Amino acid sequence: MTQPVDLLITHASQLLTMEDGLGLIEDGAVAVHNGKIVATGKTSDLEKRFVGQEIIDASGKTITPGLVDCHTHLLFAGSREQEFASRLKGADYLSILQQGGGILNTVEQVRQATPADLIQHGLKWLNEFLTHGVTCVEIKSGYGLDYANEKKMLEAISALSEYTDQHLVATFLGAHTFPKEMKEQPEKQMDELVKRMLPDFRELAEHCDLFLEKGAFSLDQAELILECAQSLGYGLKMHTNQLSQLGGIALAKKYQLLSVDHLDIMSAEEIDTLAETDAVAVLLPGASFFLKESAWAPARKLIDKRIPVALATDFNPGSSPCPNLHFVMNLAVHQLGMLPDEVWQAVTVNAARALNKNDTIGSLIPGKYADLVLWDMPNHLHPFYYFGKNFVEKVWVNGRYAHLH
Ligand code: NIG
Ligand code: FE
């Protein structure tokens, strides 16, 4: 007896289930029903067990789980190409911020933007992500920096979820930097974050992130934010060890962070400490590239210590205006020394884990959402080999065909 299913994809020259490594099946098939994965296996086996209402022949092509971008600042207004041009002439990213530009420039523009402006901007870029096979996107607030504007950003993220097929995960990043009006009164801003924003935004954001860096938040301030966010039940994340080492890795252990992000500069001791935690190391080589950093995250050393490594675009207008996760995957191979298998894990299972979503997305295991990408390429090495070409042909989210514009 064959079981009827909504969709049966057959004859994929490679199917990556991402179960225990790549989970590579040649001449692979996937059965999908009610938006979920029902089974994966050899075509010859699945054709005996299932009959698809829709059948897709994927001969000569590759199927993978939908990609997960677990660190973006996708919602912003305006752009900062002038800042980029000054950096090319020698200006420094943190000095620009300390002089009231950089992130604060984007804050001004976001404060002036209407919710509709933000939503329109968000949809444009989400679609760009979709064309690259990204079916789950984490989006941070952090360009409002006061109660009303952080709320506006978080509400825009939840509104975006209604308009896009993609899974969106909202992260509160009120502790991105101190806004101009609070520069001289950091205690007042800390109070505002801890007493009003964090408690009030719990329903709007799943995770809480912060920027531990010179010119942003100090170790003591970071600890206050984490303490409060933890008591409220947020998943905890931190931008740390990007441009300086301020002690963030010890906090990852103390507060059981879900992820630590950037990690461009790491001592051997910090790597050892991180290995004692469950945190995912989210590496953002797009930012290292665009800031022309001399240090690249020590991916090999992290992997050698069995630390789960994820990769993300960090898409934002200042340090990584790159909406293309494939470019980041290529940087990982060339600049971080990661192997293609490790890169695929970093943008699927490990990225899902960095969002605490590994029960539902990131791999093709029965019961998980049928988020799938059909790539017009015979094997999973092609995005690294023909670098710069986008092989994505079709994308499904929750078993439904997503329209690529
Ligand atoms: O991840 N580091 C802080 N936040 C972003 C940059 C934001 C911006 O420059 O607008 C990052 O690199
Ligand atoms: Fe970031």
Image: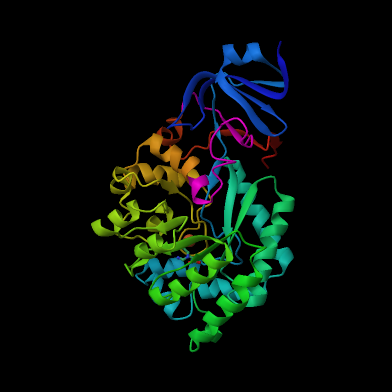
Is residue 120 something one can see in this rendering? no
In the image, 86 versus 380, the foreground residue is 380
Is residue 372 something one can see in this rendering? yes
Vertical placement of 216 versus 45: above or below?
below
**Within the magenta stretch, is there residue 363?**
yes
**Magenta range:** 351-379
Whole-percent x and y of residue 11?
57, 17
Quarter of the rendering containing residue 264: bottom left
Whole-percent x and y of residue 16?
50, 29
Query: Is 20 on the left or on the right of 57, as rendered?
Result: left
In the image, 375 versus 67, the foreground residue is 67
Vertical placement of 40 versus 363: above or below?
above
Query: Is 337 on the left or on the right of 7, as rendered?
Result: left
Where is the N terminus found, in terms of image quarters? top right
Whole-percent x and y of residue 182?
53, 85
Query: Is 156 on the left or on the right of 100, as rendered?
Result: right
**Within the magenta stretch, is there residue 190?**
no
- What is the residue that sits farthest to the left in this orientation? 268
Q: For the point 58% across and 15% down, which residue is it? A: 43
Query: Is 398 on the left or on the right of 78, as rendered?
Result: right
Quarter of the rendering containing residue 32: top right
In the image, 303 versus 379, the foreground residue is 303
Vertical placement of 280 versus 338: above or below?
below
Task: Look at the magenta stretch and give its main secondary structure.
Answer: loop
Q: For the point 33% across and 60% down, which residue is it? A: 293
Vertical placement of 190 versus 75: above or below?
below
Whole-percent x and y of residue 189?
54, 82
Q: How is the image coloured?
A: rainbow
Where is the C terminus found, in terms of image quarters? top right
